[in-house]
Amino acid sequence: MKAAVHTRYGPPDVVRVVDVPTPTPKDNEVLIKVHATTVNRTDCGFRAAKPFFVRAFTGLVRPRVRILGNEFAGQVEALGPGVTSFAVGDRVFGYDDTVCGAHAQYLTIREDASLARIPANLTYAQAAPATEGSHYALANIEKAKIRAGQRVLVNGGTGAIGSAAVQLLASRGVHVTAVCDTTHLELMHRLGAERVVDRTVSDFTEDVQTYDVVFDAVGKSSFGECRRLLEPRGVYLSTDLGPAAQNPFLALITPALPGKSVLFGFPRHDQAMMNYFKET
Ligand SMILES: NC(=O)c1ccc[n+]([C@@H]2O[C@H](COP(=O)([O-])OP(=O)(O)OC[C@H]3O[C@@H](n4cnc5c(N)ncnc54)[C@H](OP(=O)(O)O)[C@@H]3O)[C@@H](O)[C@H]2O)c1
């Protein structure tokens, strides 16, 4: 089969499309013919080994994972002898950020991994990008225990994480304000935002409205800048470490103090999450 392979860390041109052996499914694995995948921030970070600490997971000197691609949609082509929950021909989508392997014509994955059948009304191209950003968004939404009726501002509403956050929050009955550039104002409304702030026209940190949660899904602000936007017991979430890597420290200290706090969502993924995305 053809696969996009990188054998050293670096810019996009370290990736070469070459012939590699098609994987064979083990006892509890399925073989999937990949119809759609994405090149997302996780792929780019793993390919370039940026930030440096990713080498702890991807290989200190050279990449251990040579075929990237963590989210995918495709068709089950063959089954390991012990597989009971999928059948040949099933249309499936999934997420795997440890083995990866979706930037290839075929991949194998355990049947109990983050894998689910695609709803009949979705194409492969629509299902493939539904997991990576969504699982980061969900981790933060659950960490802050965001409930129906609350007011939440999402900065970076058009990104992988931000666009998932807007949709997941709207589906839970949350009043969403999204921040994006001029070209995406209409898109944000279509995804479920009640209010949209054009970041090229105004600075969202000077908004007159207050929020139960400010979710900076692009990590461009700080707790200090967003404090005045928060209700007295409001929560600040960010997908980045923040200035001087302050967010993890603030997430340790501020929840123990009265008033506004910083929380940090740690992502996880499983089949229950896949089914939730499928139904949402
Ligand atoms: N995916 C991951 O692997 C991962 C994991 C953990 C944390 N993070 C962090 O989370 C952040 C978002 O990740 P992502 O995968 O969602 O990224 P993404 O899909 O590349 O989206 C980034 C979004 O940020 C917006 N943006 C760019 N500059 C901005 C600014 N100055 N102010 C407001 N919005 C701005 C862009 O919107 P426009 O098109 O409107 O410019 C774009 O929609 C990144 O900072 C990343 O480091 C990512």
Image (cartoon, rainbow, N blue to C red):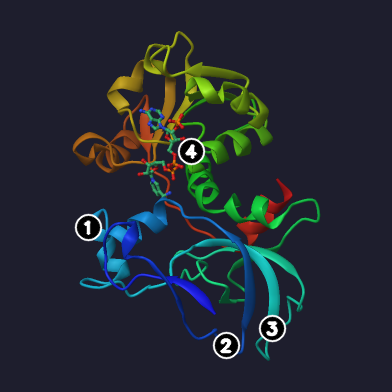
Residue at the disc numbered 2: 24
The residues tagged by marks 4 and 1 sit, at their Cα atoms, a distance apart of 23 Å
Observer-nearest of 212 and 259:
212
Ligand 1 lies under 8 Å from the Cβ of mark 4: yes
Residue under label 3, please give it.
Answer: 78
Residue at position x 45%, y 64% from top? 97
Secondary-structure class at tag 1: helix
Mark 4 sits on what residue? 159
Position of residue 203 in the picture relative to residue 185 (left or right): left
Residue holding disc 1: 52
Q: Where on the picture, by quarter, is residue 235? A: top left
- Counting from the top left corner in percent of width and height, residue 133 is at 51, 47
Task: Mark 4: give few (<14), some (14-19) or many (20+) Cα within 10 Å.
Answer: some
Q: What element does badge 2 sit on?
A: loop
The residue under the point 64% across, 60% down is 272
Q: Earlier in the sequence, mark 2 or mark 3?
A: 2
Name the quarter where the N terminus is drawn: bottom right
Indicate left or right for 204 with 1 as reference: left
What separation in Å lies between label 2 and label 4 (alpha carbons)? 35 Å
Name the residue type under label 1: Phe
